Image (cartoon, coloured by chain):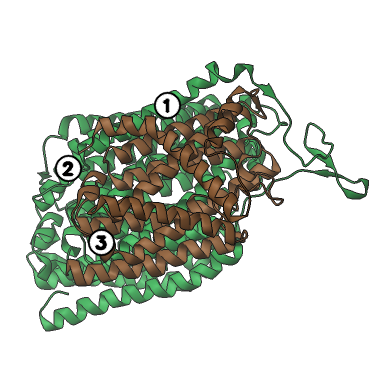
């Protein structure tokens, strides 16, 4: 136990250092535009190569041990590509500008640094309880926290690397980290889901690696391995690697048909889910697509990828309606939001890139808050089912309010996601095939309102029974949860600032023009946030004198805990249930549509690029 | 782009106008049913009486939600009449609606709970068409600002007949008129008691009524946008459209929620989307 306490202290301290570090980076560098650092390529690249091979061996070992031969095959293919590349093509490479920062990296660094650390700190106390509740799970917390920090480190590496080979290296580390974390409990289900995540991400990894073969054959000097040079090289050169790498982005961002891994990842301890959803893994996927947005802009391949995102947004939102498990609702809403980000980034106009980055920020804050709140509730009540969350406002008033803030952050007007959705609608209208995108967005956003609002209603229902259980939640968790709740509200208040300081300069730097929301709209939005914040005050003034009555039960005689006299003298209990519409929005039913459609769209994108290349045009 | 004066005028006059419309609605309805009906000012008497009644609640928090409902309904309506961004108006309306739904949930009562769930279904049913309406008007007039759309000389209705029909359909849903009054049973029918509003009484119910008046005025204002090129015609169409709604209200019995969903989404997908595609390719050009 004292050992735990030391570890927890170290983690809290590291978390603090990392958060402060990212804030310091922001404070010192946000005015600098893109800055490149000629970090030496060798011997770094050799070290990375050795680590990559070690990872491959580890995965081969695990794959054979657990008889996951498809994973073994994929590892072999990817390793073969990497080896071939290293042996025959990498010799002459000497990229100079290997590291860089720009406004977008800073945004990502803030998300990874602050939210990632908060989750790590939360995890210390969560994992203590987790092992009390699950004595059958082997205590591998040393490994757990080690991997969590490796994961964060890899994310930093990923967003600061200008050298594609390095991006790929960190990319693979995030795949490995999520694989290890998903399989933490070592149950059969966890292991299978970990391998599912591995396999799907390896598919992306293979595409990523394949882009190197193309790049090296086009430019043996290796200048194109610099991300900025590649993006600036124009579509005729960059479209093939862009499509390959963005395909990898689709797998990592859990777009259909690859969405299964993120849902499966729910078996991991809740902080892992929070980490995967808000500050690491899936954000790497959308990060890379946003980077390549200028290359995809105006191409049919970009539109096809965008349509994958849009279809994913619509169907994943619809599936979320049919889920009663809170974590699965969160998972599908993440997939949906990533879909929206992918749709924006792939179509790639300045307005849409602005919206995509806003979505990334708001989603990171609100989703981490929601996951950690659900994790806390689950530990205290033993259930993560939404149907068991009746009267959460009575049992866990503060947490219920935080969940409500998080949910509001995901879909209500003055809050973040909605601002971005709105910007996305405005952005899509003027984009190619805009009407199709806008229509999908209109339906998707209506569906979103339904599943969030009914959950919100469930937790805010004031039951006449139930007692406050909140005292049992540890202080460390409170600190993390309140910080995230504050961040969600702050993000809504400060988004104009974030936009003008970071996002607009980035978009301007990439496109030479920028995008923003109209000023008077921003003022109205801020007024709305303030109005919302002041509303609870009226509780103290107005309704003191109102008389309380029992609910209307059709004239039945009712006990205070809502048991009523049914027919034939039987006492029945009043219960309420949300609608889930399994028959319309069932998971299997919609995936049966979504997966083939998205596979088809990806094939179309590939075919368009291939055919276009053979004809010497870009489609 | 936005005008504070029209916003203030709206805040003051809309409840009067909305109440009057409700009164006329009741009168016309009564005549359709062969009754004399209450005086046109009856809704005002009703609301005044509600405010004299005792303030009773199941849980105090529901009053807060209803206050928020009224405030945001008024604010978003004011923003509409101030000439603001149509999309923002739509989203602010959604926010207002979520508050009344939360108020109904908060009471933890079987009737209001089901009413709340059904209200969300109707919300989900009409939202796509509302957004497509805004998008259609943008495509035709080149702006999302109500002030630009309303003063545009483009005869939007000629380009957007499908969107307009779609909007009329969801107007029935939004006004909670039969056959789509699944969440409130506004004729106080048997099925759901008063659904969403079962647990509200006295002044709080009065606030809901006033919010509804605000909303009616804004919804009719949205019809104006299709005819902004000719204000006289616009007013005539608004009157006819409302009469049509009353007629529908009195000729159809309540449908199941499935039908509400299918109607809302169907018109959005067929009338709305097809109309927009045609406008996109033939008028705006690619």
Cα–Cα span, label 2 and label 3:
18 Å
Circle nearer the N terminus (2, 3)? 3
Could you tell me which secondary element the residue under label 3 belongs to?
Answer: helix
**Between marks 1 and 3 in the image, the one whose residue lies nearer the viewer:** 1
- Chain of the residue that carries numbered disc 1 in the rendered image: A
Quarter residue A20 falls in: top left
Please name the residue that numbered disc 2 is placed on.
Answer: A504
- Which chain does the green colour mark? A
Left or right: B108 in relation to B234? right
Picture residue at 17% right of the left edge, 69% below the top: B285
Residue B229, above or below A299: above
Please name the residue that numbered disc 3 is placed on.
Answer: A346
Q: Position of residue B120 (x, y in %)?
A: 54, 50
Quarter holding the N terminus of chain A?
top right
Cα–Cα span, label 1 and label 3:
36 Å
Residue A267, above or below A381: below
Please name the residue that numbered disc 1 is placed on.
Answer: A533
Picture residue at 50% right of the left edge, 64% below the top: B263
- Which chain does the brown colour mark? B
Pick the residue in front: B199 or B201. B201
């Amino acid at each position: 136990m004292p050992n735990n306490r030391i570890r927890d202290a170290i983690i809290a301290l590291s978390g603090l250092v990392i958060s402060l570090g990212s804030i310091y980076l922001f404070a010192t560098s946000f005015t600098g535009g893109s800055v490149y650092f000629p970090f030496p390529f060798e011997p770094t690249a050799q070290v990375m190569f050795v680590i990559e091979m070690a990872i491959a061996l580890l995965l081969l070992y695990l794959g054979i041990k657990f008889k996951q031969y498809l994973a073994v095959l994929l590892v072999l293919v990817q390793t073969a590509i990497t080896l071939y590349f290293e042996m025959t093509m990498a010799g002459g490479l000497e990229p100079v500008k290997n590291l860089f920062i720009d406004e977008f990296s800073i945004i990502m660094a803030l998300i990874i640094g602050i939210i990632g650390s908060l989750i790590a700190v939360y995890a210390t106390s969560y994992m203590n309880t987790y092992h009390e509740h699950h004595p059958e799970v082997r205590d591998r917390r040393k490994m757990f926290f080690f991997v969590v920090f490796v994961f964060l480190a890899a994310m930093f590496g990923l967003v600061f690397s200008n050298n594609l080979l390095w991006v790929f290296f960190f990319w693979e580390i995030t795949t490995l980290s999520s694989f290890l974390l998903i399989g933490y409990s070592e149950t059969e289900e966890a292991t299978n889901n970990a391998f599912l995540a591995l396999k799907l991400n390896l598919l992306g990894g293979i595409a990523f690696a394949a882009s190197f073969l193309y790049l090296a054959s086009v430019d043996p000097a290796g200048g194109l391995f610099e991300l900025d040079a590649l993006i600036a090289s124009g579509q005729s050169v960059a479209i093939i690697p862009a499509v390959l790498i963005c395909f990898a982005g689709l797998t990592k961002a859990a777009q259909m048909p690859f969405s299964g891994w993120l849902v499966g990842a729910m078996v991991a301890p809740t902080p892992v889910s929070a980490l995967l959803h808000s500050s690491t893994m899936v954000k790497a996927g959308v990060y890379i697509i946003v980077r390549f947005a200028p290359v995809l802009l105006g191409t049919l391949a970009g539109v096809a990828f965008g349509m994958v995102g849009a279809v994913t947004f619509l169907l994943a939102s619809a599936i979320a309606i049919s889920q009663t498990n809170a974590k699965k609702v969160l998972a599908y809403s993440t997939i949906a939001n990533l879909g929206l980000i992918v749709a924006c980034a792939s179509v790639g106009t300045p307005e849409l890139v602005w919206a995509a980055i806003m979505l990334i920020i708001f989603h990171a804050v609100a989703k981490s808050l929601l996951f950690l709140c659900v994790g806390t509730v689950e530990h205290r009540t033993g259930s993560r089912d939404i149907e068991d969350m009746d009267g959460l406002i009575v049992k866990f008033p503060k947490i219920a309010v935080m969940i409500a803030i998080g949910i509001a952050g995901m879909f209500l007007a003055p809050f973040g996601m909605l601002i971005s959705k709105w910007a996305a609608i405005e952005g899509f209208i003027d984009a190619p095939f805009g009407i199709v995108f806008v229509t999908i967005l209109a339906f998707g956003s209506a569906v979103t309102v339904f599943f969030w609002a009914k959950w919100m209603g469930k937790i805010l229902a004031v039951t006449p029974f139930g007692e406050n259980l909140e005292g049992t939640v540890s202080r460390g968790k409170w600190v993390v949860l309140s910080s995230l709740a504050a961040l969600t509200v702050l993000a809504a208040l400060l988004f104009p600032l974030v936009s003008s300081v970071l996002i607009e300069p980035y978009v301007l730097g990439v496109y030479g023009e920028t995008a923003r929301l109209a000023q008077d709209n921003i003022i109205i939005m801020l007024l709305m946030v303030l109005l919302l914040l002041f509303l609870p005050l009226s509780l103290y003034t107005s309704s003191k004198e109102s008389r309380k009555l029992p609910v209307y039960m059709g004239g039945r005689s009712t006990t205070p805990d809502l048991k009523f006299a049914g027919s034939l003298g039987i006492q029945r209990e009043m219960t309420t249930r949300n609608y889930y519409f399994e028959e319309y929005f069932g998971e299997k039913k919609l995936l049966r549509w979504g997966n083939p459609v998205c596979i088809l769209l990806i094939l179309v994108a590939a075919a368009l690029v291939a055919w276009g290349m053979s004809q010497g045009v870009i489609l | 782009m936005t005008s504070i004066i029209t916003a203030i005028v709206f805040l003051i006059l809309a409840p009067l106008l909305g109440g009057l419309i409700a009164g006329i609605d009741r009168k016309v309805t009564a005549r359709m049913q062969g009754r004399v009906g209450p005086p046109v000012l009856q809704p005002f008497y009703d609301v005044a009486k509600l405010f004299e009644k005792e303030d009773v609640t199941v849980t105090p928090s529901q009053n807060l939600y209803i206050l928020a409902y009224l405030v945001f309904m008024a604010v978003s309506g004011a923003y509409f009449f101030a000439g603001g961004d149509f999309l923002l108006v739509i989203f602010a309306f959604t926010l207002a609606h979520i508050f009344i739904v939360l108020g109904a949930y908060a009471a933890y009562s079987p009737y209001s709970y089901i009413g709340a769930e059904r209200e969300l279904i109707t919300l989900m049913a009409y939202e796509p068409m509302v957004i497509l309406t805004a998008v259609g008007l943008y495509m035709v007039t080149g702006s999302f600002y109500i002030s630009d759309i309303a003063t545009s000389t483009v005869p939007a209705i000629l380009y957007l007949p499908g969107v307009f029909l779609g909007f009329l359909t969801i107007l029935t849903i939004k006004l909670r008129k039969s056959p789509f009054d699944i969440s409130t049973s506004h004729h106080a029918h048997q099925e759901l008691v008063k659904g969403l509003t079962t647990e509200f009484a006295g002044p709080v119910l009065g606030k809901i009524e006033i919010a509804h008046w605000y909303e009616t005025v804004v919804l009719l204002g949205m019809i104006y946008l299709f005819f902004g090129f000719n204000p006289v015609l616009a007013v005539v169409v608004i009157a006819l459209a409302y009469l049509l709604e009353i007629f529908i209200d009195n000729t159809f019995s309540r449908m199941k929620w499935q039908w509400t969903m299918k109607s809302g989404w169907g018109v959005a997908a067929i009338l709305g989307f097809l109309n927009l595609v045609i406008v996109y390719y033939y008028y705006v050009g690619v």
